[in-house]
Image (cartoon, helix red, strand yellow):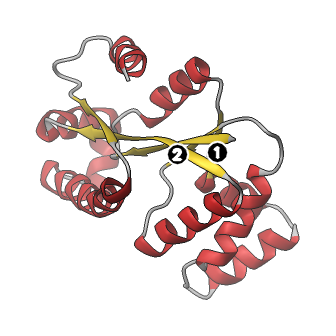
Amino acid sequence: MRKIQILNSDIYAGRDNFSELLSTESNLRIISIRDIIRTEYKSDSEIGIKIKEYIDNGTLLPTDFVNSILQKEIELDNKNILMTNYPSTESLYYGFNSLVSSLNIEIEKVWYLKLVNLEYITQKELIKLGEIYTAKYEITNDTLLEKIKAKQKNLNNIIELWKLDYNVLTVNVDYEKENDIREYFKEKIKSA
């Protein structure tokens, strides 16, 4: 039976580093629905045209439509999978569970990269963005902190759904405390 691991990640929590390390360690193929949709959107494929229609009309992509894209991607090969930051809504959660069940795929692990010490990360991100950019777009420590908290709150709703049926492996990400985040991630992956 094929297996899938799910990686949910707060913004700025190191999703790309973690997914790269986890996919290498566990021999998983990474699927990012966000990347697939971006690629399709830029193409003139039938799927890309439909995506453009939904976006141009200001509507969310329907669950069945997203799942059809996802099914096509999953069926490209027989490798086990790492799904990143999907599903992101309750409707997508139930649709996704139905899809993997119908494809006879076992959800092996659910990961949550939880950003802690939010004040520290907002200060670092403001420095990265630079004074000109932050002034131009009126980005302050408070506005960035509110953005992170809002995204965390939305993700927590999905995490609570996962917890109903699965053991969620939470990795607390504290950039101030951890000097080498990649080594920290490797330790967490190996100990799971």
Q: Which residue lies under the disc numbered 1?
A: 31
Q: Which of 128 and 89 is in front in this view?
A: 89
Residue 25 in view here: yes
Expressed as whole percent of the image width and height from the top left, the position of residue 23 reads 59, 27
Q: Nearer the viewer, residue 92 or 183?
A: 92
User: Residue 61: which quarter of the image?
Assistant: bottom right
Amino acid carrying mark 2 in the image: Thr
Expressed as whole percent of the image width and height from the top left, the position of residue 44 reads 87, 67
Q: Is residue 5 shown left or right of residue 3?
A: left
Instruction: Looking at this view, name the residue that lies furthest to the right.
Output: 45
Q: Which of 91 and 59 is in front in this view?
A: 91
87 shown above or below 109: below
Q: How crowded is mark 2: few (under 14 residues within 10 Å), some or many (20 or more)?
A: many
- The alpha-carbon separation of the residues under discs 1 and 2 comes to 6 Å
* Residue drawn at the location 44% of the way across and 36% of the way down: 15
- Secondary structure of the residue carrying numbered label 2: strand
Q: Nearer the viewer, residue 149 or 120?
A: 149
- The N terminus: image quadrant: top right
Which disc is residue 84 wearing?
Answer: 2
170 shown above or below 43: above
